Amino acid sequence: MLRCNMISGSASRATRCVSIARLSASKQSGHFLSPHRKAFASTANQVSLWKHKSLFHHYRASQGGATLAVMEGCSHQQYRYFFFGRGNSDGDGDDDDDDKSNKKGKGKEKEKEKEKGKEVQDKKEEEKNNAHETNPSGTSDDYEKPAESKENKSTRATYSSKGSASHNNVWLPASRLGFGDQAPRYPHLMALPLVRTVFPGVPTHVTVTDPKTIQALEKVVSGGSGGYLGLFLRKDHSSEMPKGNDKPEIITSASDLYSVGTFAQIQTMTPTRLNNYPDMNESSDGDDVLSTSPSTSVMLLPHRRIDLISVDDIGPPIDVTVSHWNRMRYIRGQDSTRDDTIRALCQEVLSTIRELAQMNTLFKEQVAYIVPNTSMFDINDPYRLADLAALLSSGGDAKELQSVLEEKDPEMRLHKALVLLSKEREVSKLQQEIQAKVEEKMTDAQRKYFLREQLKSIKKELGMEKDDKETLIEKYRNKIAEYPTIPEEISETIESELEKMSSLEKNSSEFNVTRSYLDWLTSIPWGITTEENFDIADARRVLDRDHYGMDEVKETILQFIAVGKLKGSVQGKILCLAGPPGTGKTSIAESVAAALGRKFYRFSVGGMSDVSEIKGHRRTYIGAMPGKIIQCLKSTGSTNPLVLIDEIDKLGRDYRGDPASALLEVLDPSQNYTFRDHFIDAPVDISKVLFMCTANELDRIPGPLLDRMEVIRLSGYDVPEKLEIAEKYLVPKSMVNSGLMVKQDLSEEKKEDEDADSEGTNKMDPLAPQPTYHLAERVPPSLSIRRSALESLVRWYCREAGVRNLSKKIEKITRLLSLQVVAEEEGAQLTEKSKRKSDTWEVSSDNLHEYVGKPIFTSDRLYEKDPLPHGIVMGLAWTSMGGSALYIETQGIKRGLDAEGKPRGGGTLNVTGQLGDVMKESTQIAYTVARARLAEIAPDNSFFDDTDVHMHVPEGATPKDGPSAGITMVTAMLSLALDRSIKSDLAMTGEISLTGKVLAVGGIKEKTMAARRAGIKTIVLPEDCRRDFDELPDYLKEGLDVCYATDYSIVYDVAFVTDSVK
């Protein structure tokens, strides 16, 4: 240890020893140990300072104001080093300086003899105050001298004259020439820019990363000046930092620093290395490597405020010229009003600090650390109290803290500090409110959780409830016991999952996956089937009750019931109902389910492009679930429901798979008894399910899928069928929905008995008879829709194959009738369009236009006159909306002669009418056949050679395609070439080959209905379509003369020979 006697001034005035400081050399690399100031619990070596009254006498030297010290046991050269940083322990140094020191030493010895008597008194005072501890702030004037051990004496030799310990990483400041307000006042200092304002009196840590600045700090420490420097706040550090420079201690201009800073002394310097950011340096082999950057952690003890006079060098390091602030003291009694204001501000600051300490735990800990370790806490000194308040406002803006540092007026400094504290208080209040809300939620949730757990424990002790896991397992076993038969593989899977669940933690993710899997496994109705209805008469009654016509569908269902009754067991079947929109495909499926006594489930696959919708997701995915097939079994609770797959011809396909291919397994009777869903991953028997599919166009269904289905074609409704459907179903339904009629299924007595017997249920008897209807009370008795109105609707408004548009027109009539009834009852005025124009409430063909507007179709024929113009023939076409009569028009363009007298043009065919590719090919075939036939019939006729032919199919906005107009086109071109007309009541359809063969076409029923609607009496059909025509109802065939053709010669005879008109 080194024992040093601190005296003031020259040797002649050195009269007493003022302190002893024990120094323990640190064994840890990079620590600076202060010989007089060590109040930090975090440092490895503590230095104890003892308080004593009047132990320090200060002398401000004329040069720099340095305080001198006499070191006991040190050589003259060591003495000089500790004062001025010059010389070494070996006696090297300036001789002039040594002579001056010797002269001063002789003077000191003379004065010691004169002061000998006084030293005895001083020693007594030292023993009296030996128990006092050091004031950690370093602002006390008196220190007591502790006993020095032998170990302390031996420690001196471990420090070199250069000011460093024997350990290379430990740097020791050369001298401690005072601290606090007694610190020296150097005019020239090294400046260290900071990003946070530092106030005097409180130690602070700073990390320096610039190598040049670090070297300069080491020189300051080892140079003997005491390790003093100036700390200045940077202006807008984040915004004005030069690009590529992340070191705050580097500035580019003198204006980067504020004019007021803090004079501080280095206490410790700890070299470190920063490895947390990449420094892309190129290695020897060309690869980028991650290097470290040196840095140093510096502990500083601020002493007083200083003004920045000038920046001599912007460095690094930065050299500045400063002027030191004198100790500012507030003298009370000069201005009573100001005294009261300052006293009130002081009290408010203290009150705010006390309030913040109660509200914020971190603030309270900060106060508990700072106040005992600083002299700033002085309620009688407004300057220091304001500094303390600003220091405690850690969240304050750097500019606001700097303004407190620069303020000299005590009242304004207190005001600014109080503003910072007030902001801190508001933030703490907001934080407290947020914490209260969070704690309230957490407390409520915890209370409920504790109560729930207590309730579980109580119920478990009483035997009323088991553990959640045990309850679930017991629930699954009870559900399994309800099923009559479970497949062996399914039973093994369930048992395996139950065993796994019993060993899993209920809060784990695997537990939830297993639970979801068991939920679905135990929800499938294994072995449960609904009792089917094998009574054919009852089934027929149900089918006829809900739908008119559709004999083929009804016959197929009755056959299915009969087979099941004979076999005693029912197997599934796959039916596909194909037809135009509005023909009742979807609604008939529900009636079939009611007739069979099966549960009904419907899902649409229109636009579906994900295979998982059919076969489910794999359990590895989050939110995985089975496909529609397994869902329908769970929803219906039986293994033999009727499942309707709607719009199967509109399946999509994308990167997620092809649902049409996934349906192959579902709709294949030879495979679906072991259907495997991706989620269930076990065989499920769906062979008892009756699948019904609906489609508008069979051509859009993939061939392999269509091959697995039994197709039933619905050709649409003719006029009589539409009339029957409108009278029996559409009109009563629309009248009931409009409030004009009341549905009465049973008599009042029977209804009351039924309500009493079926109380609490809402099931409708599928075998109930056809309901009856009667007019509502306030409806006029004569209100009705006549049959003639329905006939006009079907003929002139609704010519499509289905009845959906017809239903819309009827609903429009009934709504207007309801409006008229209510308006006349209330006496309200209606618009000219809505009011009733006739005297009767009956809607007939005469006043139908008042309810639905003008007819959409004004005529069945485009050409009313008989015969037709040359080159025009009526054909028959099939569309998705039903059949229609289609005219083929041809016109010849005869070219004139050119300059040489030769005819221009001829031999070309132009086609219009938005025809498809197939129909365009038919025109070319028809043109070739017509030229060939003309050469046989009239060899001298050169019409096609001399004339260009233009063929057009009217209604050009409607796309048309198909080969069925081949014979019609040939007939039209021959009519033009032979200049002969075709009778107007003749229509034909059929495809023609290049040799003149007439080939079969489809849609015979729709085309026949279109012919009857157009008033056609003679139809030419291919011979191969005779079977289709014979299957038509008699009322459709009645009055029609049908000619069957195998070759075009027969068509020619019918069109031009037998019934030709010139």
Image (cartoon, rainbow, N blue to C red):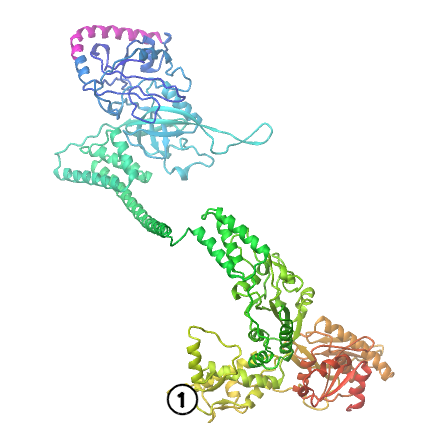
Residues in magenta, as a range: 94-121
Q: Does the magenta stretch include residue 566?
A: no
Question: Residue at 42% across / 36% down in the picture?
Answer: 241
Image: 694 above or below 245: below
What is the total number of numbered labels drawn onto the structure image?
Answer: 1
Q: In which quarter of the image is residue 379?
A: top left
- Binning the other alpha carbons within 10 Å of mark 1 as few (below 14), some (14 to 19) or many (20 upward) gives few
Return the residue at label 1.
824
Q: Which of 548 and 848 is in front in this view?
A: 548
Image: 109 above or below 649: above
Locate residue 604 relative to residue 911 in the image: left or right: left
Q: Can residue 391 be seen in this view?
A: no
Question: Residue at 40% across / 86% down in the picture?
Answer: 823
Q: Does the magenta stretch include residue 106?
A: yes
Image: 283 above or below 98: below
Residue 778, given in percent of the width and then of the height, sits at: 41, 88
Residue 664, given in percent of the width and then of the height, sits at: 65, 62
Residue 176, given in percent of the width and then of the height, sits at: 30, 19
Q: Can residue 818 be seen in this view?
A: yes
Locate residue 857 relative to residue 248 in the image: left or right: right
Locate residue 374 relative to residue 592 in the image: left or right: left
Q: What residue type is labelled 1?
A: Glu
Q: Regarding mark 1 in the picture, which secondary structure is present there?
A: helix
Q: In which quarter of the image is residue 698?
A: bottom right
Question: Residue at 69% across / 64% down in the picture?
Answer: 704
